[in-house]
Amino acid sequence: MNDTDRQTLSQLLDRCLQQSDRLLVQKTKMGNTEAYLSTVSLEWLSDRVQFAAQLPLFRQKIDPETYAIAPDADTAENLQQRPLDWSRQAPLTQYLATRHTHKFPALLAVLSPPWTDDPKAPQWDKEGRARETAAHFDPLDRNHSLGLLSLNREIDIFALDGQHRLMGIQGLMELIRTGRLEKYKKSKKTTGVAIAIDDPYQDIDRAYLQTLPQETIAIEFIPAVIQGETRQEARRRVRSIFVHVNLTNIRLSKGQLALLDEDDGFSLVARQIALNHPLFKKGRKTKDRVNWNSATVAAKSTVLTTLQALQEMARVYLVHPFPHWKPTDTGLLPLRPDDEELKDGEEEFNILFNYLAELPSYRQLKRKDTPELRRFSHDVGGGQGNMLFRPVGQIALVQAIGFLVYKKRLNLHDIFTKLSRYDAEDGFSKIDFSSSIWYGILYDPLRKRIQVSGKDLASKLIIYLIAGQEDEFELIKLKTAFAKARTMGEEQAIDLSGAWVNPREIELPKML
């Protein structure tokens, strides 16, 4: 294309695009549905695109506050969308307002001119079939692939896929317009502290915020009705597209999210430990010791822990020296720490794992594999039943050490001197035996499996073993919880000698 042709084309396009009720689009086709791909500003999207529940078909069946559709005999067949989760709005808005690298995927929207919801409109023939398609497209090339899509104000546009993205963008416009955005529960009831532009903890740049309405996002339009369809066939087609989009949209596991996260300080530190610490490093004779995807470790698995568990260990340990790494409110996104602070966090966590690696339990890895150390005595092949080879046991231990170091002001050397002695005496092993203090806490004797719900009690018990408990009320609470964990019936508890006693007779183990 020469300069003259380019200039002529530019003038023609400028003339066409000056009309606010038209949008330049690329036409696509898959199956029997034509679609039109374009970009729009965030401001335009917030103003023009509606939630699915706002369709005329549902307007008598929705909650005007939450836009939640009330399923009944009339709407059950036509229901197309899951309920909106309003608790997601604030995190999505905060993400757009504070992350300069933000990016939303394209939205899928449905074009619905007024006649599609009027069975008596002339666009329907006597048999109830559409005489035309709901999208009016004027081609600009001979192949009919590039053209202008009519989008006048009479046409309803609603999000078929991307309702929560739309919610986040609408929240952004609200924040820009009023300077604040309320946080909601799922049902759109206010909760917590609102996001405010003038709140220094939100880290919102006013000047940057004003540029966001003109940012653009990809959007794909499909017609609510295709020529030749009945209203029922059109509804079924649109609903089918929604189901297929959601079924093929595979969600990342928490482990995969931790692996890819570039903002959460705890995830970043955990990832560095998983990749570089000798306890987890993979060698020619060493199998991979970190499960990068799943949150659990099977009894037969050769891994030592999971990335998700390491992330949680980093959180419960480093939250003391770096409390600001944690978002100011539940659901909000964390802000990436600066490089110097991340380096400090990695050093703190690395020192901890240097001590952990020297525990007698982990030193066994030089001659034994993890399944043998993890399995309970009743599992096939038997094993040590060692809680330090279970993610929940690892988290409980690190959580306790974090409290002892940063709250009790004990040093790691003294803590691990006691832990190593306790570990050498099989204190962390054979937790499936009643003589173990972890029996009933991290091991469920009735179901004969690990018990995740006992993590916090296990952590408190480790703190008590190392440093005692000076608060008499807290000591009574700990003793009561310990007795309850070992109670198998209303008045039947098993003590550390294996005898059945009254729960009141259960005593705490001796301090280390």
Image: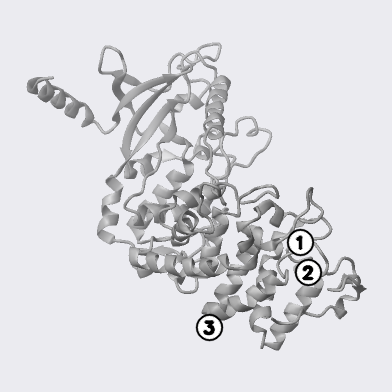
Residue 141 to residue 269: above or below:
above
Q: Residue at x 57, y 78 (%)?
A: 404
Q: Dot 1: what SS?
A: strand
Q: Quadrant of the C terminus?
A: bottom right
Q: Residue at x 30, y 50 (%)?
A: 212
* Residue 193 visible, this orientation: no
- Mark toward the start of the polypeptide (2 vs 3): 3
Q: Position of residue 274 (x, y in %)?
A: 50, 55
- Residue 420: quadrant of the picture: bottom right
Depth check, front residue: 46 or 89: 89
Contact, mark 2 vs mark 1 (Cβ under 8 Å):
yes
Q: Which mark is residue 409?
A: 3
Is 104 on the left or on the right of 406, as rendered? left
| Viewer-nearest of discs 2 and 1 | 2
User: Mark 1 = which residue?
Assistant: 443
User: Mark 2 = which residue?
Assistant: 436
Q: Dot 2: what SS?
A: loop
Is 426 on the left or on the right of 222, as rendered? right
Residue 99 to residue 423: above or below:
above
Amino acid found under the numbered disc labelled 3 = Arg
Few, some or many C-alpha atoms within 10 Å of disc 2 (few <14, some 14-19, many ≥20)? many
Real-space CA distance between mark 2 and mark 1, rounded to the nearest whole angstrom: 10 Å
* Number of numbered callouts drawn: 3
Depth check, front residue: 209 or 423: 423
Q: Residue furthest left?
A: 4
Q: Dot 3: what SS?
A: loop
Q: Residue at x 57, y 68 (%)?
A: 358
Depth check, front residue: 152 or 419: 419
Q: Position of residue 490 (x, y in %)?
A: 90, 69
Contact, mark 2 vs mark 3 (Cβ under 8 Å):
no
Q: Position of residue 279 (x, y in %)?
A: 54, 59
Few, some or many C-alpha atoms within 10 Å of disc 3 (few <14, some 14-19, many ≥20)? few
